[in-house]
Amino acid sequence: MKRRGLLDVFFSNSGKPPFDRERFVFKLLAVVILTQLSLYSVATMVCHRVALNDRRQLAEVCPRALDQVAASFDSTLKLLVALLGGAALNRGGK
């Protein structure tokens, strides 16, 4: 029987799958996208509520809010496509 040291007990990888870096990155990206969506949704709702109370157009209350939302999601989608393309190239090369 092999004798195990104290560090082997704490840092052994018994029963656990190896760390999947791609899965971690995609989960982290999902959290970032959902957080971004939540923040922009709250900001849009606040602007909409202020616009309704003041009886003005949404574009008058928050003039650049909708442009920022569109630009943000555009860059997020480009990042996601780039990451998926990089993952596909990486898997194709193995």
Image (cartoon, rainbow, N blue to C red):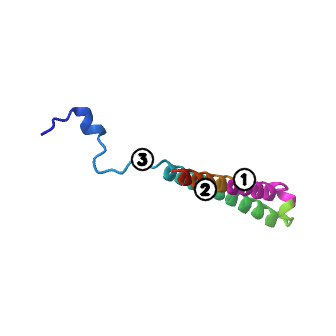
Q: Nearer the viewer, mark 1 or mark 3?
A: 3
> Magenta part of the protein: which range?
60-78
The quarter holding residue 68 reads: bottom right
Image quadrant in which the N terminus is located: top left
- Nearer-N-terminus badge (1/2): 1
Which residue is label 2 attached to?
A: 84
In this view, 16 is above or below 6: below
What residue is at 69 percent from the left and 57 percent from the top? 77
Which residue is label 3 attached to?
A: 19
Which residue is label 1 attached to?
A: 75
- Nearer-N-terminus badge (1/3): 3
SS at mark 1 in the image: helix
Q: Nearer the viewer, mark 1 or mark 2?
A: 2
Q: Nearer the viewer, residue 88 or 58?
A: 88
Residue 74 rendering spot, x and y as whole percentages: 74, 57
Q: Which three-letter amino acid code belongs to the residue tagged 3?
A: Phe
Relative to residue 10, is residue 45 drawn left or right?
A: right
Residue 9 rendering spot, x and y as whole percentages: 24, 38
Q: Which three-letter amino acid code belongs to the residue tagged 2?
A: Leu
Q: CA distance from mark 1 to mark 2?
A: 14 Å
The quarter holding residue 6 reads: top left
